[in-house]
Image (cartoon, rainbow, N blue to C red):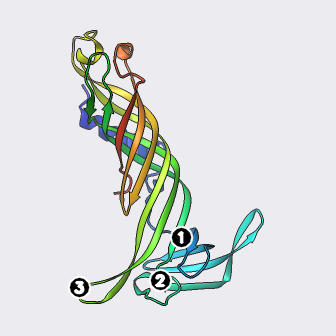
């Protein structure tokens, strides 16, 4: 019999290597690319940001109808930690819209009462690929240290909405099958659904609406087969 921990590890390896290279799974740090720049003094503008270590080089862009090009003759570079009041990037925010591919797991599943079985809160091993659309905010925040020295850093928050699908295990026993199954075992399920995620720095949590399919002959008697549940999910590609 396959142990739950072995199955969980196998699912993660399969999803990470079979669907997309590990380094392509989204880590949502500030990276080089196109952003909308919002500053306290100016109207939002489209810019290209080149990130190098602790420094950013911000280029203006030229709208050419269906294409946007980078104006390499007009840019400004600055170390993020050295941004102070009076700097053009003081209190600024870089906003980015993008597609998102992540690994996720549903930590808790709330299943409504069904077939005489009360409400359940399940915590079973599972992993899934999540695909969605996200909006990230990178804000330059300046704070005083205990030594009264000012330091600026890039704070990150984001939101995304999309679909997930993957595999996991669930407890199969007489209670959840209306006594149609006499034995108890860990059944393998295919899970899918939609989710809304919030990201703060490297922590990504979400609320999902999901559906599970039992992948064996007892699916027709399992009370929760293809029935909706609410779940608390955690993005696991950010660590």
Mark 3 neighbour density, 10 Å: few (under 14) some (14–19) many (20 or more) = few
How far apart marks 2 and 3 lie (CA) works out to 21 Å
**37 vs 108: above or below:** below
**Which residue is tagged 1?**
32
- N-terminal of the two: label 2 or label 1? 1
Residue visible at 53% across and 85% down? Answer: 88
| Image position of 34 (left or right of 31) | right
Q: Looking at this view, is 18 or 142 the one in front?
A: 142
Residue 10 in sight from this viewpoint: yes
How far apart marks 2 and 1 lie (CA) works out to 19 Å
Disc 3, SS = loop
**Which residue is tagged 3?**
146
| Image position of 165 (left or right of 48) | left
* Total numbered labels placed on residues in the image: 3
**Which residue is tagged 2?**
90
**85 vs 61: above or below:** below
Residue 20 in sight from this viewpoint: no
**200 vs 41: above or below:** above
Horizontal and vertical percent for residue 206? 39, 47
- N-terminal of the two: label 2 or label 3? 2
In front: label 1 or label 3: 3
The outermost residue toward the right is 65
Residue visible at 37% across and 14% down? Answer: 217
**133 vs 89: above or below:** above
Residue visible at 35% across and 84% down? Answer: 151
How far apart marks 1 and 3 lie (CA) works out to 32 Å
The outermost residue toward the top is 180
In front: label 2 or label 1: 2
Horizontal and vertical percent for residue 45? 63, 73
Residue visible at 40% across and 70% down? Answer: 155
Mark 1 neighbour density, 10 Å: few (under 14) some (14–19) many (20 or more) = some
């Amino acid at each position: 019999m396959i142990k739950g921990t072995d199955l969980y590890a196998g699912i993660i390896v399969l999803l990470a290597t079979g669907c997309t290279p590990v380094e392509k799974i989204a880590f949502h740090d500030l990276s080089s690319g196109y952003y909308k720049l919002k500053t306290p003094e100016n109207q939002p503008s489209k810019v290209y940001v080149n990130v190098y270590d602790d420094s950013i080089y911000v280029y203006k862009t030229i709208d050419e109808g269906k294409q946007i090009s980078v104006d390499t003759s007009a840019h400004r570079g600055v170390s993020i930690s050295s941004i102070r009041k009076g700097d053009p990037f003081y209190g600024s925010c870089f906003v980015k819209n993008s597609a998102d591919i992540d690994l996720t797991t549903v930590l808790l599943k709330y299943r409504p009462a069904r077939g005489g079985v009360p409400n359940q809160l399940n915590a079973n091993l599972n992993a899934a690929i999540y695909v969605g659309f996200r909006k990230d905010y990178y804000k330059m925040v300046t704070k005083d240290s205990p030594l009264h020295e000012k330091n600026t850093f890039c704070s990150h928050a984001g939101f995304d909405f999309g679909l997930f699908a993957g595999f996991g295990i669930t407890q199969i026993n007489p209670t959840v099958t209306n006594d149609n199954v006499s034995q108890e075992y860990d059944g393998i399920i295919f899970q899918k659904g939609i989710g809304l995620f919030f990201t703060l720095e490297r922590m990504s949590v979400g609320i999902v609406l999901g559906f599970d399919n039992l992948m064996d002959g007892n699916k027709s008697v399992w009370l929760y087969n293809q029935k909706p549940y609410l779940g608390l999910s955690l993005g696991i590609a950010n660590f």
